[in-house]
Amino acid sequence: MNKIIMILVAVEILMCHQSISQEWAHEGAEWYYDYGIFYYVGYIKITYEGDTVINDQHCKILTKTRITKDLTTYQYDTVFLGNEYTWSDGDKVYIYRHEQFYTLYDFAAQPGDWWIIPETYYTNSCDTIGRIQVDSISSIVINNSTLRVLYCSEYENSHWSLGPKIIEKIGSVYSYMLPEVNTNCGIADLFEGGALRCYSDNDFGLYSTGIASECDYIVSVEKDEVPEKSFEVIPNPSDNYITFISKLFIPDNIEVFDIFGRSQKKINIKNERELIDISGLSKGVYFILINYKKKNFSYKFIKN
């Protein structure tokens, strides 16, 4: 009898621990997202800062901060981007926008299900809401916790998307936590955050996607290592081909990313002028990540 009781207690403790480990925005929760636009590189940090009540609903306050380095002036900057107010019922994560709560993630969703997502920031040409749909589902074990996974795509004509992979407790992996604009409402030249670098909280521990050597890493570029305007892309914007011009030296390699941090092409550079086929890319803003002597920085171009 005592043995049965001990087993039941152990199972209850395990289930309680599993529930805590999957809690949205658990104590100490921190997210780090990649960021890079024009000559600014760095990261977005989102932290769970406390609780509040909105419309009689208990919410968790998530604070957003952008930390960047200007590769032309070599100055660092820290900008407070505001707070987000979220809550979860265990299956869904909700976010407060436009004086109401929208579903941000739905981990009980099945293939074919869809929901409305809100804008993250105002744009002149985009709708205030978007729509995503679930293509498939699975699960993954991270830090001894079994987490549900959604594989999603943006709905036809939706102006906002969440990225292709969303993990329970963690959120979007290949994109920002919050909805970002896409090319359905014109060329997207504005975004708040990129792909996930790291997630951690006091119970779950650290999860790193591996896209950065450290969660808070900012590319190190010295003034005499990569002079301003060392590279050029012409024509910019372009339809099918761009020419990447290296004016002072040939980089080790370059890689093309979309605004959500997803790799699109990898190119080994052999010449000072390299013709690159971009006909297979969708319309929008892209970044060329240039690697030279184990240092990186980015160059923006637009695909028409």
Image (cartoon, grey):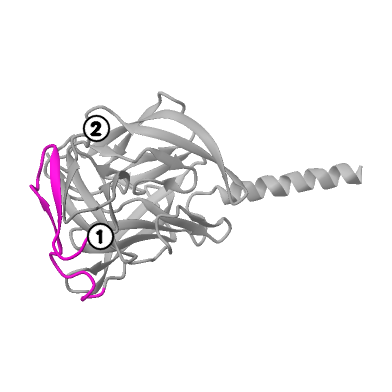
Judge whether residue 224 is colored magenta. Answer: yes
- Which callout, 2 or 1, points at the residue further toward the start of the chain? 2
Q: Residue at x 52, y 33 (%)?
A: 138
Q: Residue at 45% across / 28% down in the picture? A: 136
Comparing labels 2 and 1, the label whose residue is closer to the camera: 1
Locate residue 166 relative to residue 244 in the image: left or right. right
Callout 1, which amino acid?
Pro
Mark 2 neighbour class, 10 Å CA radius: few under 14, some 14 to 19, many 20 or more:
many
Q: Position of residue 256 (x, y in %)?
A: 26, 48
Residue 44: numbered disc: none
| Helix, strand or loop under label 2 | loop
What residue sits right under mark 1 in the picture? 251
Residue 157: x %, y % from top left:
21, 29
Cα separation, mark 2 vs mark 1, equals 38 Å
Name which residue lies at 31% across and 52% down: 194
Using a 10 Å C-alpha cutoff, classify the residue at mark 1 as few (fewer than 14 neighbours), some (14 to 19) or many (20 or more).
Answer: many
Disc 2 residue type (three-letter): Ser
Per the rendered image, the range of residues in magenta is 222-250
Rendered residue at 13%/48% (across/down): 243
What residue is shown with label 2? 158
